[in-house]
Amino acid sequence: MSSEANSHLPRYKNEVYEFEIVITCKEKNGMRSLTRHVYFSPPHVLLSPINLNTDALYSPLHHNPKLASYLPLINTMAKHLALAFSLCLLVLFHGCLASRQQSSQQNECQLNQIQAREPDNRIETEAGRIESWDYNQDDLQCAGVAVQRITIERNGLHLPSYTNTPRLAYVVQGRGHLGMVFPGCPETFEESEQSDEEQQDQQQQRQGQQGQQGQFGQQGQQGQQDFEQLDRHQRVRRVKEGDVIAIPAGVTTWSHNDGDRSLVFVTLLDIGNNHNQLDQNPRRFYLAGNPQDEFNQQGQRQQGQQGRSRQQRQGNNNNNIFAGFETQLLADALNIDQQTAQQLQGQNDNRPQIVRVQGRLDFVEPPRSQREERQLQGQQGQQGQNGLEELFCHMKIKQNIGKPSMADVFSPQAGRISTLNSFSMPILRHLRLSAERGFLYNNAIHSPHWNLNAHEIVYVIRGSARVQVVNDNGETILDDQVRQGQLFVVPQNHAVLQKAMSNGYEYIAFKTDDNAMINTLAGRTSVLRALPDVVLANAYQMDREQARNLKYNRQETLALSSSRSSQSQVLVGVNEM
């Protein structure tokens, strides 16, 4: 608005209040302040015409005898000004946050080189191991993620824990059980009767504890008697190779290997997700055991050191969350004796995250045929996206994308690719994550492409491939042969080309959007296919026949068979021999 536009309105000024709004943003490279000046006048006075392009104060005009006729207008303007003042604060605040996030991501994603790496940290336990990649590396910092590989040996139990971030886990091999505790949801699995073995165990425990529970309250004894008869718990799911499991932030999980070989998970933790309200460090909170630090073996995080020193001041070296409470307070809160509270705190338990189960891990589980029937009913109920499957407690949290029948793209010569997004598993909309499973035959090619709206974190399950990643300057920032067990990152909009070697190539790719989209550079759905041949001819200095060959040489979409050029090179090499 210019000053001339309102020159016909008489204005009078007694005083003008100037507000200076300063919002300070904390960034990695220092502090940054946003400052704005807001000028406000009480509703009983008028201002001279304001030029919005300057921050100058305006001199008062002479009193206007028609002032009273403008008072209703002035009052309305004052209300609008108050609203504008509030909006100004809101916009500045969000602008500061956006500026912080944008500046941070811009600095972290200026990548000159990417490497395919194996895990940097390793924790050995009595029944498995936990490995993690250094999330402080530039490529993982750019993607805003951390990655773990968890191996549970036969009859091993990964103790209950939760994280500050949403997780997406893929079962690389093996089979077992996964328990997930959704807060406020009912215990839908319960025993109908106790086995003779359980009854004998309980009788022996009661006889051994009669002399030790003299101080235990009558109410606690009655409560124990009420609940020891039958066990009930939330649903336990069976998982197997090829399953993708979605885990919201703060949701407790545990897992058990009842198979005949190791159960291996690869898990992505989305640190940059807005569900993580802490800092940009992955944190896992254990409810049992004496866990070691899974991500900071060299003590990089100061907060963790402060937490450990606080526990040492309390005379407690355990690291599960119960260990931080005073024993008596914990006993009062749970209505248990102090000995049980000490067991919760793990005061005499030096076992880390994965422990070996003594005997058989016996819990409530429906027969296999009934479970399959329930899964089928759940899938049928979800097609309409309403009813029980829309409830939080009944959300579908896993889906197998490793089976050939789940392929979205299949080529008899090249292989298959399966995708999992929020359309096929709605809980991913809440987590803002998705996944892709690829199985490429010998020398097949995953069409060169870029991700429109997500970072891509690729873990090699089996085989090997030649991989190249190109940035916005046309520079190759990754050119390597990746192999089983390695991980690499493809930042958003960076072009990537993957070609399987002679032993094939299997991978799982996690993506940081629930509906990640790609644009290919080769094949029937490529950007080249969509451009007019005359545009291609002029862009690449070729004739139109060459341009049409460029467009139509590939009829596949994503999984591309070995090209004629590579086949001819192989034949030439054979002839020379």
Image (cartoon, rainbow, N blue to C red):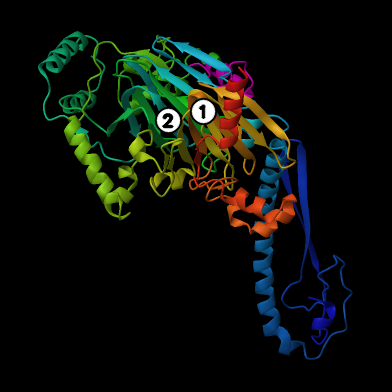
Residue at the (21%, 24%) spot, across then down? 224
User: Is residue 502 covered in magenta?
Assistant: no
- Marks counted in the figure total 2
- Under circle 2, the secondary element is strand
Q: Label 2 neighbourhood size at 10 Å, few (<14), some (14-19), many (20+)?
A: many
Return the disc, 2 or 1, that comes first in the chain's sequence.
2
View extreme (front): residue: 575
Residue 119 lies in quadrant: top right
The mark found on residue 459 in the picture is 1
Q: Which residues are magenta?
A: 291-311
Packing grade of label 1 (10 A; few <14, some 14-19, many >=20) is: many
For the residue pair 325 and 383, the one nearer the viewer reads as: 383
The verdict on residue 299 being magenta is yes
The type of residue carrying mark 2 is Tyr
Q: Which residue is depicted at the point 53% across and 51% down?
A: 525
Q: Is residue 207 visible?
A: yes
What's under tag 1, amino acid-wise?
A: Tyr
Q: Which residue is mark 2?
A: 170
